[in-house]
Structure formats: C-alpha cells, structure tokens
Image (cartoon, grey):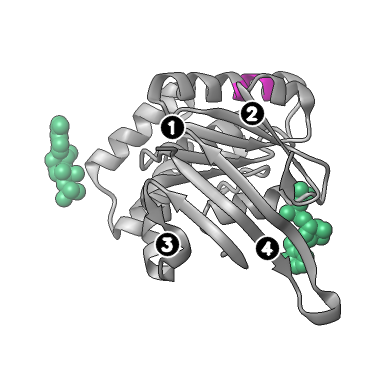
Amino acid sequence: RPLLEVMDLVKTYGEGEAETRVLKGLDLQLETGELAALLGPSGSGKSTLLAILGTLMKPSSGKHVMLGEDLTKASDRDLTEFRNRHIGFVFQFHHLLPDFTALENVIFPSAVRAGRETWAARERGRELLARVGLEKRMDFLATKLSGGQKQRVAIARALMNQPELVLADEPTGNLDRGSATQVMELIAEINQNEKTTFLISTHDEKIADTCRRRIRVSDGLVE
Ligand code: ADP
Ligand code: ADP
C-alpha cells in the first residue's frame, strides 16, 4: 500500500462571492522511499497541498489516507499526534531560534512536545547534526551559521522524530546555487539511507531534476 494517498481533494478559501477553489479534485499517491519534487507556477496550490498533507489544514472535501489511517476522519488532537510522530517539515525560511545553538534548535521542538529533554534526545540531535555535516558547529548560535548551514540544521530538526515523511516547502528558495545543490545532495542521501520519503516543492527545474519523481500541479490538479 502507498505511504499516502489523497483522492478527489478539494480546498476552497473564502465564502460566497469571495470563494476561491484552489484544489479541484486532486489525486496523488506517494510510495514509501520516494524522493519527489512538487512543481507548479506560483498560486497553483503547492503550499495548500503541502499544508493538507502535513495535517496542518483540513481539505474542504476528499479523502486523505496515510499509513493506513483515514486522516479526514481524525480529530484535531489525533492529527497533532499523528503529525508529531510521522511528519517532518522544512520551510523556505529555516525558522531557527536565533539565540539558541544549532543543537538546541534541533532538540527543542521534540523536548517541548515530550515535556522534557532526555539524554537520548540530545544524543540523537548530535548524531543528526553530524550526519548533516555540522559536527563542528553544534554549539554555534544559529545566527553564526551560513544560510546553507541553517537549512541543514532545519533538516536535522525535521528528522528528529524519525518521520516517515518530510514535507519541504521551497527548502532551497533562499539559497545560492552551491548551497542549494548541497542541501539537495543531503536530502537525497538521507532518502537513500533511511528510506525517509521526501516531497519537495520548488519552482526551480534544476532542483526538481535532482529528484527521482516530478509531480506537476496545475490549476489545482496533478497533471
Ligand atoms: P503555491 O504554493 O503554488 O504558490 P498556494 O497554495 O500558496 O499556491 O496558493 C494557491 C491559491 O490560493 C493562490 O491564489 C492564493 O492566493 C490562494 N490562497 C492561499 N492561501 C489562502 C488563504 N489563506 N486565503 C485565501 N486565499 C488563499
Ligand atoms: P531521562 O530520560 O530521565 O532524562 P536519561 O535516560 O536521558 O534520563 O538519562 C539519565 C542519565 O543517564 C543521564 O544523566 C545520562 O547522562 C545517563 N545516560 C543515559 N543513557 C546513557 C548512555 N547510553 N551512556 C551513558 N550515560 C547515559
């Protein structure tokens, strides 16, 4: 069975005269271990789709199943728990806490959720930072890191809870070509080694070409 599946997904914003239909009955399946780029012009609904796949927003109608669970029927509380266990996020802007170190940034979100910071979590944070090539910079404040390094910290943070799926919204959008390539190489390596599934929105065809699958969204549907 696929890792996730959405069927006939519809999302509208606003009401009455102001109603805009953004997703118009979109179907998509992702298999475990895929590395997929999500392409489409600005305004085509990529962020909306990522927000729904990430359980951050509910569709207006349609079905959303992941790991065999019908998420369209889940309560908000169950969705939060599902998200924390199974989904990691990387954004265009890294959203690191500036006054905290790389390591603290990686472990804080899961520590907050767990209500405490465990020794095991700290070890996992260290391991992840080593994996993204930042073993020598774990204790640097976020503000002292380059753009590419910050995005690698954000990737380590997204992997903290061993998610099956990582959703990345324009993760290289704010980086120069060299750093963007490095970030994509890192994502490909993690995808290979851990079977973590990645869905990466981008409007950069060169970035999309580094992914094994390209999914094009156009006018609220997958082409
Ligand atoms: P993309 O990520 O492909 O640029 P989005 O999903 O961000 O597309 O947006 C798709 C369309 O939905 C755009 O026309 C945008 O203006 C509109 N939209 C997005 N979010 C909202 C919102 N919260 N309220 C109303 N319209 C929105
Ligand atoms: P808690 O979950 O209550 O925070 P931990 O399991 O993280 O407790 O750790 C308890 C103590 O044992 C900590 O002081 C930590 O340094 C130590 N500890 C835990 N696991 C190991 C380990 N594998 N090797 C060495 N010390 C450890």
Left/right placement of residue 168 relative to residue 104 reads right
Q: What label sits on residue 32 in the rendered view? A: 1
The earlier-in-sequence mark between 2 and 3 is 3
- Report crowding for label 3: few under 14, some 14 to 19, many 20 or more residues within 10 A (C-alpha): some
Query: CB of mark 1 within 8 Å of CB of mark 4?
Result: no
Element under label 3?
helix
Whether residue 195 is situated above or below residue 72 in the rendered picture? above
Please tell me which residue lies in front, 89 or 18: 18
Q: Residue at x 43, y 39 (%)?
A: 3
Magenta span includes 221: no
Element under label 1?
loop
Left/right placement of residue 55 relative to residue 172 reads left
Give the labeled residue for mark 2: 148
Disc 1 residue type? Thr
The earlier-in-sequence mark between 1 and 4 is 4
Element under label 4?
strand
The earlier-in-sequence mark between 4 and 2 is 4
Say if disc 2 is inside 8 Å of ligand 1: no
Whether residue 94 is visible: yes
Give the labeled residue for mark 3: 79
Disc 3 residue type? Leu
Disc 2 vs disc 3: which is toward the camera? 3
Element under label 2?
helix
The earlier-in-sequence mark between 3 and 1 is 1
- Determine the CA span between mark 1 and mark 2: 27 Å
**Magenta span of residues:** 180-184
